[in-house]
Image (cartoon, helix red, strand yellow):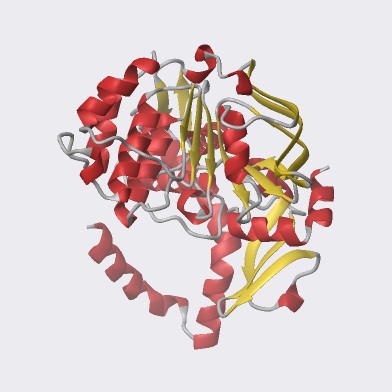
Amino acid sequence: MINIQSLTFSYRKNKPLFENLQLSLEAGHIYGLLGKNGAGKSTLLKQIAGLLFPDQGTCEVMGYTAAKRQPAFLRELFLVPEEFYLPKVSVKKYVNLYAPFYPNFDEAAFSRYLKEFEIPREQKLTEMSYGQKKKVLISFALATNTKVLIMDEPTNGLDIPSKSQFRKVIAAAVSEEKCIIISTHQVRDLDNLIDSIVIIDGHKIIFREDVQTVTDKLSFKTVSRMEEVTGVLFADSSLRGHTIITRNAGNEQSKIDMELLFNAVLTNHKPIQEIFN
Amino acid sequence: MEFKETQAIYVQIADYICEQILLHKWQPDERIPSVRELAVSLEVNPNTVMRTCELLQQQEIIFNKRGIGYFISPDAVKKIRQFKKEAFISTELPSFFRSLYLLDLGLDELKPHYEKFKKSNFN
């Protein structure tokens, strides 16, 4: 569904952000895009949305070249950016203005999402808090029913109950035809929703595996004494003990710890990558 | 539902469904909530729930009626007990026995506690 080939891009001369970046994503999944600050998560999402153009290489989405921004492409893609502007109108007016761009917009679903998030429909968007605005935008994004849905740090600014509501609406939105990409720092907010992990670091994609493959090949566990285990690929020690990653030798069914995996891939990339090759 | 950190989510969801069946909250031949409904209420990826359903189907605890959904097998309770007993004896009993041994507790001493527990929790 999304096919990025040899993508090179830089904001400034001689300071490339992406070099020869490759990535392909399919429909029917929720991808979690992880990376350090400044690694290029938002830039990559903007490339997919056609908001930035490759210096070299190609970025194809649903068969369209993203940078050409053809209407048929734009009506099947929605991006919820981290920073956004909403006009000084009511929710109702906003929908009247923007929904016509999306032929599959589902008015009833939009109302359901707003209700789930407890957003008053009559209020002006500019009179809402940041979190409330974000919830309107997320509700609108889901209601557009586009094939590609991109969300940049969607749980930023959401209060505790809304994070649970957010997970519910996303779980309901998944379908075989949709490709959902979420970039996030707060992995724990979303770790039961994300089914594929994409890690970006040092100008390229350094890890891309589905969660099932990860837990088939790696074991995540907490041990009290490091001496008890061998073949530790990564360890994080705290008062609770050592949370570790080892190769999954038997048929263990552990729960993935995305933060731990992220740190492991960044600091001990080679031996982990070898397990997946 | 509160997920534990230790076990794969799809296995925990399977345990949750089995518990509903063992507690007779969900009856044999009844339809269980759809994959989507379960995913939304548990706040997990529908693909994870799919994996749970495949596991339970393989264990013949639930069965699939094409286009309608998953139903609880007539002998689900028997099947679950069979699987769970093996797992309980091999994984949970050893540490329980260890505590009994360390505390010098006899098995017959436990009986009144067990009866009391049953009465206060499942009556």
Q: Residue at x 78, y 60 (%)?
A: A268
> Is A272 or A218 nearer to us in this picture?
A272
Q: Establish if A145 lies above or below A125.
A: above
In percent of width and height, residue B31 lies at 35, 28
> Is A260 or B120 nearer to us in this picture?
A260
Is residue B75 toward the left or the right of residue A118 in the image? right
Q: How many circles with numbers are drawn on the protein?
A: 0
In percent of width and height, residue A170 lies at 41, 37
Q: Establish if A246 lies above or below A180.
A: below
Is residue A88 toward the left or the right of residue B62 in the image? left
| Residue B72 visible from this viewpoint | no
Location of the C terminus of chain A (image quadrant): top right
Q: Residue at x 55, y 14 (%)?
A: A70
Q: Establish if A83 lies above or below B36.
A: below
Residue at the front extreme, as displayed: A13
Residue A51 sits in which quadrant? top right
Q: Residue at x 22, y 26 (%)?
A: A93
In percent of width and height, residue A42 lies at 57, 43
Is residue A231 toward the left or the right of residue B58 in the image? right
Q: Establish if A176 lies above or below B42.
A: above
| Residue B33 visible from this viewpoint | yes
Q: Residue at x 27, y 28 (%)?
A: A94
Residue A183 sits in which quadrant? top right
> Is A160 or A237 nearer to us in this picture?
A160
